[in-house]
Amino acid sequence: MTQAEDKKPRSDEARTTYDPEITSEFAIPAGLEVSRGAGEPETTSEFAVPSGLQTRQPPAAEAEGSAFSLPSTYSAQDAPPAFTPATGVSAVSLIKDAPWQDRMRTMLRMPVTERPAPEPVQRAEEGGPAIPRVLDLTLRIGELLLAGGEGAEDVEAAMFAVCRSYGLDRCEPNVTFTLLSISHQPSLVDDPVTASRTVRRRGTDYTRLAAVFRLVDDLTDAETHVSLEEAYRRLAEIRRNRHPYPGWALTLASGLLAGAASVLVGGDALVFVAAALGAMLGDRLAWLCAGRGLPEFYQFTVAAMPPAAIGVAFALAHVGVAGSAVVTGGLFALLPGRALVAGVQDGLTGFYITASARLLEVMYFFVGIVTGVLIVLYFGVKVGGQLNPDAALIVSQRPVVQIVASMLLSLTFAVLLQQERSTVVWVTLNGGVAWSVYGAMHVAGGISPVASTAVAAGLVGLFGQLLSRYRFASALPYTTAAIGPLLPGSATYFGLLNMAQNQVDKGLVSLANAASLAMAIAIGVNLGSEISRLTLRIGSAGKRRAAKRTRGF
């Protein structure tokens, strides 16, 4: 081999070694034949179908496959039928004469894409109302409703109604226990506008609550033109209005409520007076603590002590008066029935965060009552007070007296809730009906107290909802005070008494019975309200979509 021939392969080897295409780690090895398609696009997407994979296009009329069916890909050439049928989508029609609560609640439970657009109404505003001011008005109205004890779903319905009354579409209200927010998106390409407000103070004034409902009703009425400035003026008047009943009337009402409750559990005239004095003294002490800025937990603790002290004093003096009836009557004026019903209602309608917060508040109030009563009962037992836990079974049957006492209890409860005078008569009659049904089922019929309480509370909710529809107002003024005679005051007291006498097992059983009665009241009231809504036709969109949000998984 010549020297030139010996150098030629060395030159080829060098060229192979330093060729950049061959030295790349992605280079095709020599001897491997790969077909190169001209102009083939790069399949860089992770959703691209790999080469050689045969996909089966489902027929157009084939239903959606299950989890075990073979996967398929979407093709624009062989697309399924359009979502909108050829006949179009049925229009949503809502009855105009229905209360705004039902119409707005129906729309809130609908998917956003199926909600009808609001009618273009300019409430005496040139160029349309300012969106931030409408949202601020909406939040202020929702704040008054939530602070007054209204349920979260009704608060959202009111906020939704205010926004739509001023022509704002695509609004989404959100209500929790202390925070309200609302978001409005002008269009799909515009940034959403969001505002929020915190509820820091809560007060019980159903007169103010009714005035807010009338304002929302006027805003949603197509024939009533309320401008934005007029709505702000009316809202300011509602906030400045004084309570319809003075402080001395509330103290007297709390005393009469406790006296009437003591009669329901077998007390006589002397027990009535003793329970009334204990409740009024506890109410004044609670007002004193509130003036000093103490939290409500300590207010309930202090307010529960005087009735318990009077009951223990009767037991120590051996006067022959049922001290348990005195303590039970004093507890009736303190049990947070309003917050309990609102909390269970929020849970049943799907607002679990708000329901949890409300029920936690009820638990703290209840623990405060338990603490105050247990302190007094403990010292009463230590000094020799003869308190009989079995006295709960000794209740005289006086139907007429007990019905009158139940109506008096509902009447005084309505005064404590600051209701309008026009609603006091109706709620008083509703409370008498509740106790009559409970007595007929439990005392005369021998049915369990939980079932009897649930049926009586259901009738309260049904009648209250019908009365509120007749007056286009909130159902709370017609239901909350009417459940007063059904509150588990005696079961609570005897449970605490057993615990004070070191009978923890019996005490826990009695307290569990009290909790069962409280839940029966709340569920019965809500069920009665829902039954009244089922009997009334609202519109073609009246399906309860909220029931499909959870299915157990």
Image: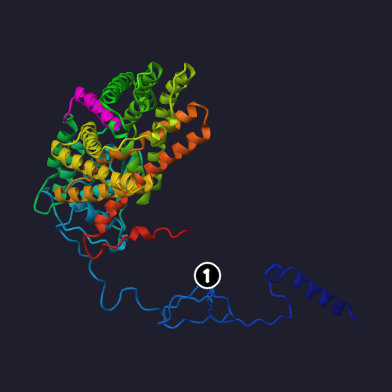
Q: Which residues are magenta?
A: 244-262
Taking the magenta stretch, the answer to whether it contains residue 253 is yes
The residue where tag 1 is placed is 47
Q: Is residue 325 visible?
A: yes
Q: Position of residue 335 (x, y in %)?
A: 34, 33
Q: Is residue 440 magenta?
A: no
- The answer to whether residue 169 is visible is no
Residue at image position (55%, 68%) is 46
Q: Is residue 20 left or right of residue 516?
A: right
Nearer to the camera, 98 or 337:
337
Count how many numbered circles sit on residues in the image: 1
Toward which corner of the image does residue 280 lie, by quadrant? top left
Residue 368: image quadrant is: top left
484 up-or-down from 441: above or below: above
Q: Compared to 457, does 330 lie above or below?
A: above
* Residue nearest the viewer, comparing 405 with 375: 405
- The coloring applied to the image is rainbow
Element marked by disc 1: loop
| Direction right: furthest residue | 1
Label the magenta part by its dominant secondary structure: helix
Q: Nearer the viewer, residue 336 or 323?
A: 323
Residue 481 location, x and y as percent?
25, 38
Q: Using a 10 Å C-alpha cutoff, classify the residue at mark 1 as few (fewer than 14 neighbours), some (14 to 19) or many (20 or more).
A: few
Residue type at the position of mark 1? Phe
* Relative image position of residue 167 (x, y in whole percent): 19, 53
Residue at image position (15%, 59%) is 96
Q: Is 216 rendered above or below residue 309?
A: below
Pick the residue in front: 24 or 284.
284
In which image quadrant can residue 353 be found? Answer: top left
Quadrant where the N terminus is found in the figure? bottom right
Q: Position of residue 542 (x, y in %)?
A: 26, 62
